[in-house]
Amino acid sequence: MTLHKRSVALLLLVIPFLSCQERLADGEPLDGLKVCTFVNAAKVYDEQGEPVSSVHAAGGGSSQACLCLTLEQTWSGDYDDYFNDRALELCLEDATRMGYPEANDCAYWHAQGHWIDLIRTDPFVDNVECDPNGESEPLGCSVR
């Protein structure tokens, strides 16, 4: 690769980051937080009704249902049903992928409201801010 081509390639990589920094410097702080509930506790069962495994995501661990909400929206409870219903969908999808589309207790945990009790800001990323109106990208910018 010639020096000119390398320079152009480097410039193409740097420009998005420079524009990102401009948006961060000029923009107002975002008032949303990434809020999630974790799909845990559910199990899948064999033909004898014995638990085989916990329901888990494709890569292992728990699936998550997340939204970008303000702190007030998070505490209002207005989205509790969304999180509980979405967690049920994810639980059933995971159980089906595991080969247990009907032999699971996802509906039980949904009926208990278990996943509502787990709603919190994303614990794996500190200070994840986002725009609850979806009008701008998360703080930190992304290169797509």
Image (cartoon, rainbow, N blue to C red):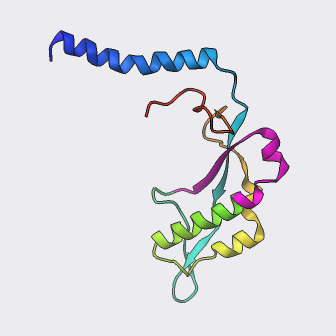
Residue located 46% across and 69% down the image = 97
36 to 141, vertically: above or below: below
25 to 32, vertically: above or below: above
Q: Along the line of sight, which residue is nearer the eye, 65 or 12? A: 12
Residue located 66% across and 47% down the image = 67
**Quarter the N terminus occupies:** top left
Q: Quadrant of residue 104?
A: bottom right
Q: Along the line of sight, which residue is nearer the eye, 22 or 100? A: 22
Q: Along the line of sight, which residue is nearer the eye, 34 or 45? A: 34
- What is the x, y in percent for residue 2? 15, 13
- What is the x, y in percent for residue 43? 59, 72
104 to 3, vertically: above or below: below
Q: Along the line of sight, which residue is nearer the eye, 124 or 7? A: 7
2 to 44, vertically: above or below: above
**Quarter the C terminus occupies:** top left
Q: Is residue 81 left or right of residue 39?
A: right
Residues rendered magenta in the picture: 61-82
As drawn, the residue found furthest toward the bottom would be 48
Residue located 53% across and 27% down the image = 141
Q: Is residue 116 left or right of residue 129?
A: right
Residue located 71% across and 59% down the image = 82
As drawn, the residue found furthest toward the left would be 1
Magenta segment: does it hold 90? no
Q: Is residue 5 left or right of residue 78?
A: left
Q: Quadrant of residue 39?
A: bottom right
The number of numbered discs placed on residues in the rendered structure image is 0
Q: Quadrant of residue 131?
A: top right
- What is the x, y in percent for residue 136? 60, 31
- What is the x, y in percent for residue 79? 76, 54
